[in-house]
Amino acid sequence: MASLLPSKWLGVIIAAAGAASVAQAQTATDDSGYRSTQDFRSFQSAGGDEEARPTVMGRLEWLKARYGATVPADFSRRMAQEWAKQRSTYPQLAPGATPPAGVPQWQSIGPTRAVKTENGIKLSVTDSGRLRNILPHPTDPNTVYLLSSSGGIWKTSNFEAPYPTWSPITDKVITTSGGAAALGRDPQTLYYGTGDPFDGIPIVGGAMLKTTDGGNSWSPFVFLGNSGMVTDVKVDSRGTKDVVLVATDTGIFRSADGGNTYTNVLNAGRAWSLARTNVGWLATVATRGYYSPATLYRSSDGVTWTPLSAPNLTGGAGRITLAVGAPGDAVVYAYAARSCDAGCDQKDLYRSADGGYTWTALGLKSKAPVNPNEENPTMELMGGQGFYNHMIVVDSTDPSRNTVYLGGQLNTGKTTDGGKTWRLLTNWLGQFGLPYAHADHHTAVVSTAGGKKRVMIGTDGGLFLSYDEGKSWTDQKNTGLADHLIYSMATSGSDPNSVLVGLQDNGTRIRSGNTSVFNQSFGGDGFGVGWSQSKTNVTALGSYVYGYIYYSQMDPNIQRKWTGPAFDDASCTYNGINACNAYFVTPIATPSAQADPGGKTYFTNTASLIYRTDDAGASWRPIFRGSTASTYIRGASHSVAVSPVDLNHVAAVSTGGRLLMTNDGGASWLMRNTLVPGHSGFNSSVAWANNSVLYVASENPTGQSVWVVKSTDNGAHWQAASNGLPNVPIQKLLAAPNDLSGNTVYAATWLGVYRTTNGGASWSQFGAGLPTVEVSDLYMPADGSFLRASTYGRGVWDLSLR
């Protein structure tokens, strides 16, 4: 058993080639140079309830620390160039293509449904991934399109069936990252803008695509200047050609030729929302994203824009969302959040009866609904993340335009008298006598196709539908949508069908047998997961934020409740893990069955410490302890790894292209320098093939020529090992457990899965049919019989290798 490191000592530094001083190697920030403005104590002080805390901001701050405060201006273009290059090199591996004989094909295994949900309250509901837009056909009630934040566009032609058949129609285009979309005059025409505004760094953002045949084929993408995201798309179909207006993080773009070309018509900051009223176009802009100053712009023709004075609306505001019942209305609403300089909460809902010239505040913060509850005693719906929770739709069947549906964080509400009185409609846990709809609301629409009114809302948990104007709601239309945002994945060593995934705001979910049903066993955000590889001792771990790791010392597949960690405020620890030093995301590393036949050892890390548990999460002890004033381990999703041979060889990716390593279980540590020409840091993942051969990958957003480096002498020397890999970030490396030579390695990249069989001398895309999506994790059993991949937006995929 390795001894614990003294708290005032950084570890024994082993003298070896390539080793650097641990003390001298570190800085206070990650490779990006950005230090998060949110830490555990500020997160904790926001309140005890999971939904009361600033989880979205924490996630965005974590991504900034990994990749930088701003996305490199050329990032999307570089990703697009690599996509085009790889698609040209491997055309037969694209989704929908016919692969060459003998090439294995990826198969989606879900999640497509849940029958059990555990989030403090047990429910039987089905959620899907976060939605950006809902686009029902104007006359056909069976045709509906959904834009998912990172799962692309989905289409059904039998929406009125109890469980519609959903098909992804953007799997083979440049990216599945969804910013915004809109129908053209012909409902077979869709305009699709890439780049979700809340994913930090989408694969390819700020580009527009178009289909004229309902998604069977797509036009080439058109970049919108240096934009990195699309926040809104609106189409004016009054003329002979569709005129398309697009709101982005670099202003507003306009196409007068049906989406073939675009011109920047307003360059004034992040444009959030567009609406056409009886006085022309309105647009809301927050110059610093979520912060003041907010400005309302007007244009009579969509070409020339001027600020419109509305101090009661824009003063102190950040993001503002506009809504009209129908384009050209005189009545327009504005749902406003306070600037994040002032708390990020709800400012108010405003109504204008003159197209946007003058505005009346409706006083939601002081107005109680007719059915208040303890979570919403007033109509302050946005909670503490008003930059994120914006759902508003005006019922066009109400000629007075007084019927409005509003959504925020936990509840939705409705008024039928223009905001004088309100009624709460849904609750995030189905409490207080209200129907269930997932928390965090983003979009809504009222459809009258086929003469039947349907209200649809989109949330972090997908689509919810009401046929009776909000009295009752159903979640079953989510069934079949495989668009969950997965951070990490684990598979049971005793049952390869058993899969555990951590998801953005959809908790930790467990696959039910050999099905696409994934039941939720722990709510909130799910991040790192672990499942013992032992055939006999089945344990599992999952994690929430800032070092919070919950554990199950039995097979969790039967929905048994997890055990949460105990928090000691004096030491700021969860079962021994220093939450005050932890990253927002908590990684978990699972040893092989050979290294850990008992199935109870796992590893995790904070910024300055590496931890080990030998009782499956009941207690943790540091095996590396650095000064908490410095950063020793990068905040990547897969930052720590253990050798498949034994538990003595542990490594963690460090800053500046370095690697923190121990060969004796933590009794002594050394810092290896992995930098070689073309490899400039941002290390993201370690793959041990054995105790001598290991690989390190990078997630450098600025680009580089060498994405993987290799050592054959336990880290003393390194060489480039990435020929053939695309010029994109890598999330995870996996050394094939059935190749004792260490020559077979798999890479989870932002453009798919790649493989080398010659120790990194050459790589090639592996498997056919995987969508263009960020691959977040990989798993292979000891016998190498299959490869499993999780994605951020398109669920989990299997590839049979036998």
Image (cartoon, rainbow, N blue to C red):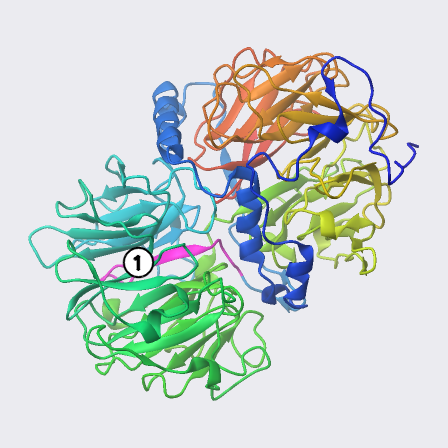
Q: Which residues are magenta?
A: 126-141
Q: Is residue 790 visible?
A: no
Element type at mark 1: strand
In the rendered view of the protein, which quadrant contains the C terminus? Answer: top right
Q: Is residue 234 left or right of residue 749?
A: left
Residue 461 among magenta residues: no
Q: Residue shown at 60%/81% (left/top)?
A: 374
Residue 287 drawn above or below residue 466: above
Q: Is residue 759 visible?
A: yes
- Residue 367 pos. (x, y %): 46, 86
Residue 34 or 607: which is nearer the viewer?
34
User: Which residue is under mark 1?
Assistant: 135
| Kind of residue at badge 1 | Leu
Residue 516 drawn above or below residue 66: below
- Residue 92 pos. (x, y %): 37, 23
- Residue 517 pos. (x, y %): 57, 51
